[in-house]
Amino acid sequence: MAERAEPTELTRMTATGIAGLVAAGEVSAVEVARAHLDRIAATDQRVHAFLQVDTEGATAAAAAVDAARAAGAPLSPLAGVPVAVKDVFATRGLPTTCGSKILEGWRPPYDATTVARLRAAGLVVLGKTNMDEFAMGSSTEYSAYGPTRNPWDLARIPGGSGGGSSASLAAFQAPLAIGSDTGGSIRQPGAVTGTVGVKPTYGGTSRYGLVAFSSSLDTPGPCARTVADAAALHAVIAGHDPGDSTSIPQPVPDVVAAAARGATGDLAGVRLGLVRELAGEGAEPGVMAAFREAVDALTKLGAEVVEVSCPHFGYALPAYYLIAPSECSSNLARFDGVRYGLRTGDDGTRALEEVMSLTREAGFGPEVKRRIMLGTYALSSGYYDAYYGQAQKVRTLIARDFTAAFAQADALISPTTPFVAFRFGERTADPYQMYLADLYTIPANLAGTPAISVPCGLSGGMPVGLQVMAPAMADDRMYRVAAALESVLPAPAPPQL
Ligand code: GLN
């Protein structure tokens, strides 16, 4: 096992801080990349945030930034900053597994739009981070490559599905990371690792090259240690993409300016709606205590906090667990042993259908199989209206609840998760116990509205997150509120690894 290692000054810095040093020529992008690669080497045997570290690619990308600077070329705001990418995004030439055996060894021939935009902006992709298989789960325990451990307590989960991305931030292996949020997979890992996680407006970031789980919900988004860094990364990846049919052809709100405004600590005139249905029910007392303190802090900053009711939010979880599995059962039909990755039992004697069946049996893990079966059932003729159709109606009611709540408040707040990071194995026996991790995050996915999780203190020594939800295409509002909270409640640093 590697030696215990203190994070260096460079690995402790914010992304914008690093970019400033690189732009000023005070440090080279290659040195920055090396510092983070060294940190990964020193800590990842314990954390296991990465499935793939691209030392060569990262070094080359960093060298290109240094060369551009030396040639006097203009640098984009995050040039030279390392970033970790969840393994659900296609990366050209670099293995992309989605945490699944069925994609082992697959090297995509193209970059996802999100990844292409990172590269074009001079960010340095360090590698691919661990996740629950095909982004289904809340703990990374469903990764086919073994779980990621929470840097705060290695006996606990880092959240999921994007636990690797958030853990890499908390372990100072990367200052920025990319995740995907279908039901909470950016915000929940952010909350339980004491980092920031953002689900942008659905359609605000491109799904092109994001391996599909539930296409009407999947949303790429930024992960960072500070709100300003998340905003800077948001600005790089967001914006219209003709390669995604649901991408919004409108300008992205100025999230960087909103975060800067929030950081001044002034929330005068801002009305926040505390969602009654998302505060209290099923939440640990320690989580509620930290949340209430944060609400007091927001009030002291000048915000007016009113209670709002979203009566249909109680049906969000069951609706999600019909819609998401339904879409996944269709999306995952493409993994058939013919087009990608694994192929099992093709000994020349078997019929194609049998090879497909053997491949899927060997390649998919238990949670993915459960979802495919559930979704296939919910979509089958005779049940379609009763399950999938009904869930879509609930979805409309939830969207209407949001509209009504946003008529009373500029943004909505709740705890991000009902409980802090749990111990490995605590919630794998009963799928419902795992699904409860996303009780508060799922409504925003069903409505397509943006939401952010920002650290708001500790419960029993483990991080708690506060969620700020905003109307669609008003992502800037949630950044302002989150940055204001951060200015008076800085994220606590995780204990040394
Ligand atoms: N935990 C939720 C699920 O298992 C959400 C996953 C996600 O957002 N990708 O479906």
Image (spheres, rainbow, N blue to C red):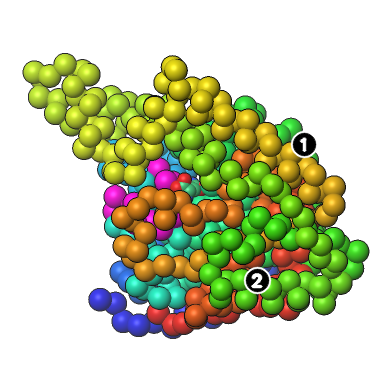
Specify the amino acid type for callout 2. Answer: Phe
> Could you tell me residue 383's position as x and y percent?
45, 22
**Considering only order in the chain, which callout, 1 or 2, is on the residue closer to the N terminus?**
1
Is 140 a magenta residue? yes
Q: Residue at coordinates 42% horizontally, 31% vertically from top-left?
A: 375
Q: How many marks?
A: 2
Q: Residue at coordinates 33% horizontally, 60% vertically from top-left?
A: 147
Is 444 a magenta residue? no
Callout 2: few (<14), some (14-19), or many (20+) C-alpha neighbours within 10 Å? Answer: many
Does the residue tagged 1 have its C-beta within 8 Å of any atom of ligand 1?
no
Relative horizontal placement of residue 74, taking residue 36 as reference (left or right): right
SS for callout 2: helix
Specify the amino acid type for callout 1. Answer: Gln
**Magenta region: which residues?**
134-145
Magenta segment main secondary structure: loop
SS for callout 1: loop
Callout 1: few (<14), some (14-19), or many (20+) C-alpha neighbours within 10 Å? Answer: few
The residues bearing labels 2 and 1 have C-alpha atoms spaced at a distance of 34 Å
Q: Which mark is residue 291?
A: 2
> Could you tell me residue 67's position as x and y percent?
57, 58
